[in-house]
Amino acid sequence: MAVPIVIDCDPGHDDALAIMLAAGDPGIDLLAVTTVAGNQTLEKTTFNALRVCTVAGITGVPVAAGCAQPLVEPLEVAEDVHGVSGIDGPRFPVPTVAAVPEHAVELLRRVLIGHPEPVTLVPTAPLTNIALLLTRYPEVAGRIKEIVLMGGSTERGNRTPAAEFNIHVDPEAADIVFRSGVPVTMCGLNVTHQALATPGVLARFEALDSELGWICVELLRYFAGTYRRLFGFSAPPVHDPVAVARVIDPRIVDCVDAHVAVELHGRHTRGATVVDLHGRLGLPANARVAVGLRTDLFWDRMVAAVAALGAARD
Ligand code: BDR
Ligand code: CA
């Protein structure tokens, strides 16, 4: 049975691939895509989600725009990582799908209440929409099967030395999510930095020789340039699809139970995820924390999803 999910995202090169994985893999039933400000402004991330859905032939999946600002601090975008548009690199056709005229939080509530089974939320962006959902409509928490998010790290950060981007942009929202009591799985940088789009991976997308395959190649080439320039990586880490892959097949992403706290006040560490891997604090675990990635299985599913979407279109 396909797992019903909603992706809450801020496309974003890797968010684009996460949407494709969710839409193209038979293990997922993608019920909706919601957007939030993060990698770029809300206007741009929403437009990008529509561009990705169009090029991937994803129709009939509602796309709704959510929060334009984090809960407390002003928005910090990641133009240095994702470019002016948020998905610089490929030339996208003009979107032929439109966003629904409903706030993301309202759409999330409606989907959660209306679906016959509990739904998995997959946030791949700052957690503003999800935190707002849980505070405005606490009664829907029981309708959420789990929240499988890309964010944080068991180690260091990427936006600051201590903090990963998604958590750093809205730490208060992340704090609400980790303390919500809803089952949370955290796929952080310590695993997503293993999902490297090496030249071998690019060759697999090239070999598909579909319009969508080439879009992926161009997305990944741009992302490769970013990661070489900013971080000295030899290949770019494709963060966001790792969370989707965990939902598709838990064997792809190995997890351990741990207590995760979000640093809200540190002078140098605001937005850091403090992961108590060895139980030193004696606190009950509030998350499953990703610690290992089966990169072979991960790329097999990612490439197969793009192949399936591309074949349906071409
Ligand atoms: C996360 O930040 C964003 O730039 C990416 O899309 C990903 O969600 C990685 O830190
Ligand atoms: Ca993202």
Image (cartoon, rainbow, N blue to C red):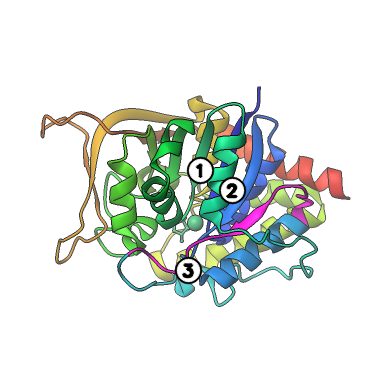
Q: Nearer the viewer, mark 2 or mark 1?
A: 1
Q: Furthest-bottom residue in view? A: 84
Q: Residue at x 76, y 47 (%)?
A: 60
Q: Residue at x 44, y 44 (%)?
A: 149
Residue 56 within the magenta-colored segment of the rendering: yes
What is the spatial separation of the Cα atoms under label 3 and label 1, in whole angstroms?
19 Å
Considering only vertical position in the picture, is 214 above or below 182? below
Q: Residue 124: where, in percent of width, then height?
A: 48, 51
Question: Which residue does the numbered mark 3 point to in the structure image?
Answer: 68
Magenta span dominant secondary structure? loop
Q: Residue 275: where, in percent of width, then height?
A: 23, 41
Q: Residue at x 61, y 27 (%)?
A: 116
What is the spatial separation of the Cα atoms under label 2 and label 1, in whole angstroms?
10 Å
Q: Which circle's residue, 2 or 1, is located before the other in the chain?
A: 2
Residue type at mark 1?
Val
Residue type at mark 3?
Ala
Asked if disc 2 is less than 8 Å from ligand 2, the answer is yes
Residue type at mark 2?
Ala
Q: Is residue 213 left or right of residue 124?
A: right
Q: Quadrant of residue 1?
A: top right
Mark 2 touches mark 1? (CB < 8 Å): yes
- In the picture, the disc for residue 122 is 1
Helix, strand or loop for disc 2: helix
Question: Which residue does the numbered mark 2 point to in the structure image?
Answer: 18
Task: Please state the extent of the stretch shown in magenta in the rendering.
Answer: 55-71
Residue 139 within the magenta-colored segment of the rendering: no
Mark 3 touches mark 1? (CB < 8 Å): no
